Amino acid sequence: MIDSIVEDSKSGWIAEHRNIYLADGEAGHMWDSAPAGGPGLIPTLLLYTVGRKSGNESIMPLIYGEVDGGYAIIASKGGAPKHPGWYHNLMAQDQVKVKVANDFFQATTRVATGDERAKVWEQLATIYPPYKDYQASAGSREIPVIIIERA
């Protein structure tokens, strides 16, 4: 079975967005989500992780929201029944690299829980409403909300 997110990350729209972002952080920062069913221009960051099995660096453009002390991202994988690979890599690392527009920095991450998760989930679902559909599609998998804080 082909994983469309993995394929798009290699050569599709995700790869195209990442390449624009890497070339010019300001040009890549705002992603036009309308073709994917989103509300239009929304903020994205680049998350750099290292593969826990491969040891290779991976760079993933992700929608984000600003939260107290940092940023928040959602590990939705489009509502798939399993967490995205970058999430598993993130959980195996003490620090990651992040690029927001042209601001490049080291960061720590943690999974939001309880009231914090609920509040941040609603914030990001307002930015990108398809997240609510993704949660419905994910079945029993609770989609993780990740908090990123500058190291």
Image: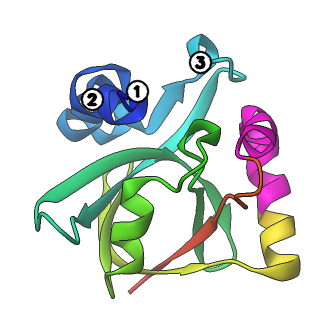
User: Residue at 88% of width from left, 78% of height from top?
Assistant: 115
- Location of residue 99 with respect to 23 vertically, above or below: below
Its colouring scheme is: rainbow
| Front in this rendered view, residue 44 or 139 | 139
Residue named by callout 3: 36
Confirm whether residue 27 shows in the render: no
Residue named by callout 2: 15
- Location of residue 30 with respect to 68 vertically, above or below: above
Question: Mark 1, mark 3: which one is toward the viewer?
Answer: 1
Residue named by callout 1: 4
Amino acid beneath label 1: Ser
Circle 2 SS class: helix
Which residue sits furthest front?
1
Q: Which residues are magenta?
A: 121-138
**Marks 3 and 2, how far apart at CA:** 15 Å
Earlier-in-chain disc, 3 versus 2: 2
Earlier-in-chain disc, 1 versus 3: 1
Q: Residue 77, image x and y in percent? A: 53, 43
**Marks 1 and 2, how far apart at CA:** 12 Å
